[in-house]
Image (spheres, rainbow, N blue to C red):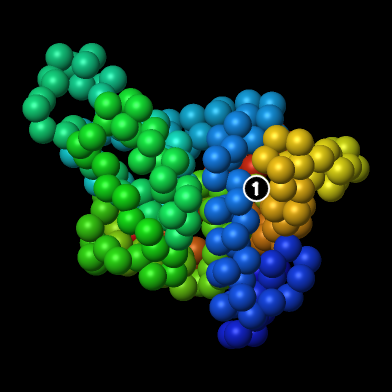
Amino acid sequence: MAGTSSNSETDFGFRRVSREDHRGLVGAVFDSVAGRYDLMNDLMSGGLHRLWKQALIDTLDPRPGMRLIDVAGGTGDIAYRALDRVERRLEAQDAASAEPPATVTICDPSDAMLAVARDRAVDAGRLTGVEFVCAPAEALPIGDGSATACTISFGLRNVSDRPAALAEMRRVLEIGGHFLCLEFSPAVLPALAPLYDAYSYKVLPWLGEQVAGDADSYRYLAESIRRFPPPDTLSEELKAAGFGAIRHRMFSGGIVALHTAWRI
């Protein structure tokens, strides 16, 4: 499992690589697929990723004044959903303000992914309340206690040093800050496992080739799920990083888990 390796090595799919090489390899994956990333999410999950992300947003319960750090934020899907929720809440309260009702910082190590996020912001006329930071999860250029909430959605399994990333995300949270991680899980129900494996190893690379012109990146993404720890193990890692009140919920027969914790 990634994160259980030596100090200098980790997993890139089913391969063992140095952490330095891992950063470059993962970066190449997301630079390659950035332009088709959102479309591929819809195709790969049959639209289910929207329901999983909705569950994260419902649990986060974004409110005016929220300061959200979205790590591995990619094309901004979680960040913009959170801002949309805050704006709808203000509209319902008839409390619109000229000031941004909430702020989000989208952090991602891929310039290509952030470029898509910026384009989405421009297209939506969302020119305030959003900051874009190109940085890995293990070294966030953000001050201690800066955020009321920190999210990472389908990104934790791609970091090169998971304990360091978890420690960083705890560091940027204020006391009482909320951490939420949405991630694929290897703990799929046994009855679903054969079908899920066939889909992951055969259909996903084919879709990647047809839609994004890149089968290898989606082969890696399927493999990375199998190398990620099961939810109970990740809960122990969150505890070791200093989080408290740790919980997780499973979705879609164990395909996805939503982990929540607090800086206490």
The residue beneath circle 1 is 184
Which corner quadrant holds the C terminus? bottom left
Residue occupying image coordinates x 33% and y 26%: 124
244 lies left or right of 50: left
Residue occupying image coordinates x 39% and y 63%: 135
From this view, report whether residue 33 is shown above or below residue 83.
below
Q: How far from the left and from the top, in percent, is residue 212? A: 67, 40
Which corner quadrant holds the N terminus? bottom right
11 lies left or right of 239: right
Near mark 1 (Cα within 10 A), the count class, few <14, some 14-19 or many ≥20, is many
Residue occupying image coordinates x 44% and y 54%: 111
Identity of the residue furthest to the front in this view: 213
Task: Give 130 or 231, whichever is nearer the viewer.
Answer: 130
Residue occupying image coordinates x 24% and y 66%: 144
From this view, report whether residue 211 is shown above or below residue 185.
above
Identity of the residue furthest to the left in this view: 98
